[in-house]
């Protein structure tokens, strides 16, 4: 088996290939595709459905969200095998739909774990990833720098609830910023009970309906468009507005700030780089809540997995690999267009 950084991550066996979160879907039965979750940076680039599709392994929730984001249905399973390897989707703790891949090389009995995006901390309705022993670990490095070490989720949620409750009590509506897929649902689940009046930006509202369809119990919100700057309901009673992250100042939220004293609250691990995050988002308050593992949790995953080889990918792979080597682990960053990994070990 060889590992390539090609079409994202490619495990090549003598007669077949396993494509991990590929930009281009495989087109033959000699390929198998694994999709870890439905964030766009892990999905195929094109919205055009291939004439033929390789077998696809992912969660049912990812398949449903894939349909929403790419415009066509895929037939999936949570495990698959041929005579060279077997693969199983396992809980990764990143989002409601996310999974990691547990892969076995049948020729050598080596176990490979591909994390996709991952988090070991249980949060709200999410069960954290449970590391298991493996021979090869392909590990995400979004927060691969040592400076990113987060406080506990429960602590941050308590602080957020206190802050939001205080603003609502003073008559100020509150906007909660989070990615449309993943963070917005978690904020709804953990904070939605703080107000009876709840609105969502269109993309978040659509994700809410799909997650409700998939069985997630969320607080109902009303859809709001970016053009709907008049919200007299906030003059009668303050409420919550679930809104996506944005770069720089947002004119819609700025209007609501002027008219209704809206308070904007950010939720992101990047808040540890607070000066930059606050400037870009123009937030009133922020809490370090992330769907990814921080540096300490990444190190915990490595120690509990006890792999002989580690490939770091996404985010800060060079920094994470460097720190892991300092800890005595055999780690290298998996770089774009890098071919076989055998020469590095």
Image: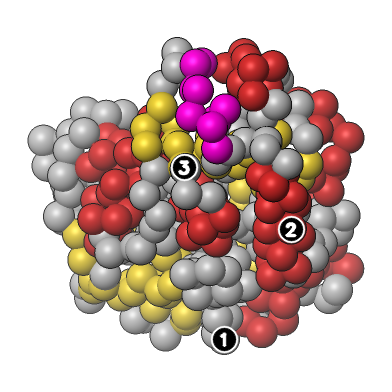
Tell me the magenta residue range: 229-237
Which residue is at the front of the view, 264 or 206? 264
User: Residue drawn 78% across and 35% down?
Assistant: 284
Residue labelled with disc 3? 198
Give the residue at mark 1: 133
The numbered mark, 1 or 3, whose residue comes first in the sequence reads 1
Residue 169 horizontal/vertical position (percent): 69, 47
Q: Where does residue 65 sit, x and y in percent of width and height?
A: 30, 47
Q: Residue at x 73, y 41 (%)?
A: 170
Q: Is residue 326 visible?
A: yes
Element on which disc 3 rests:
strand
Query: Which numbered disc, 2 or 3, marks the residue that appears first in the sequence?
Result: 2
The residues bearing labels 1 and 2 have C-alpha atoms spaced at a distance of 40 Å
Q: How far is mark 1 from mark 3, CA to CA? A: 44 Å
Q: Which residue, given by chain and number where applicable, does mark 2 sit on?
A: 162
Q: Residue at position x 44%, y 31% from top?
A: 201
Front-lying residue, 202 or 271:
202
- 159, above or below 245, in the image: below
Quarter in which the C terminus is drawn: bottom right
Q: Is residue 345 magenta?
A: no
Give neighbour class at mark 1: few <14, some 14-19, many 20+ (Cα, 10 Å): some
Secondary structure of residue under mark 1:
loop
User: How many residues crowd mark 2 within 10 Å: few (<14), some (14–19), many (20+)?
Assistant: few
Residue positioned 57% across, 74% down in the render: 122
């Amino acid at each position: 088996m060889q590992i390539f950084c090609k079409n994202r991550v490619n495990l090549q066996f003598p007669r077949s290939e396993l494509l991990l979160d590929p930009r281009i879907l495989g087109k033959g039965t000699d390929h198998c595709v694994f999709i870890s979750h439905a964030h766009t940076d892990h999905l195929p680039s094109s919205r055009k459905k291939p004439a033929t599709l390789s077998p696809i392994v992912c969660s049912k929730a990812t398949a449903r969200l894939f349909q929403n984001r790419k415009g066509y249905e895929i037939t999936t399973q949570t495990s698959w095998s041929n005579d060279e390897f077997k693969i199983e989707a396992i809980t990764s703790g990143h989002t409601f739909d996310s999974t990691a891949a547990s892969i076995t090389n049948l020729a050598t009995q080596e176990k490979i774990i591909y994390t996709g995006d991952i988090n070991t901390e249980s949060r709200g309705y999410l069960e954290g990833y449970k590391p298991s022993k493996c021979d090869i670990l392909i590990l995400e490095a979004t927060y691969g720098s040592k400076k990113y070490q987060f406080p506990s989720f429960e602590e941050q949620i308590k602080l957020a609830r206190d802050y939001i409750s205080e603003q609502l009590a003073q008559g100020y509506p509150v906007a909660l910023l989070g990615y449309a897929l993943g963070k917005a649902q978690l904020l709804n689940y953990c904070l939605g009970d703080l107000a009876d009046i709840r609105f969502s930006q269109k993309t978040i509202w659509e994700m809410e309906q799909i997650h409700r369809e998939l069985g997630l119990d969320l607080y109902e919100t009303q859809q709001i468009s970016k053009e709907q700057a008049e919200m007299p309901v906030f003059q009668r009673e303050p409420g919550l507005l679930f809104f996506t992250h944005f770069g720089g100042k947002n004119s819609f939220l700025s209007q609501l700030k002027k008219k209704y004293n809206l308070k904007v609250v950010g939720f992101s691990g990047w808040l540890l780089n607070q000066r930059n995050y606050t400037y870009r988002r123009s937030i009133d308050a922020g809490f370090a809540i992330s769907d990814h593992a921080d540096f300490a949790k990444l190190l915990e995953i490595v120690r509990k997995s006890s792999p002989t080889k580690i490939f770091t990918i996404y985010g800060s792979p060079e920094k994470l690999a460097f720190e892991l080597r300092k800890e005595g682990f055999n780690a290298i960053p998996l770089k774009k267009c890098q071919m076989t990994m055998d020469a590095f070990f």
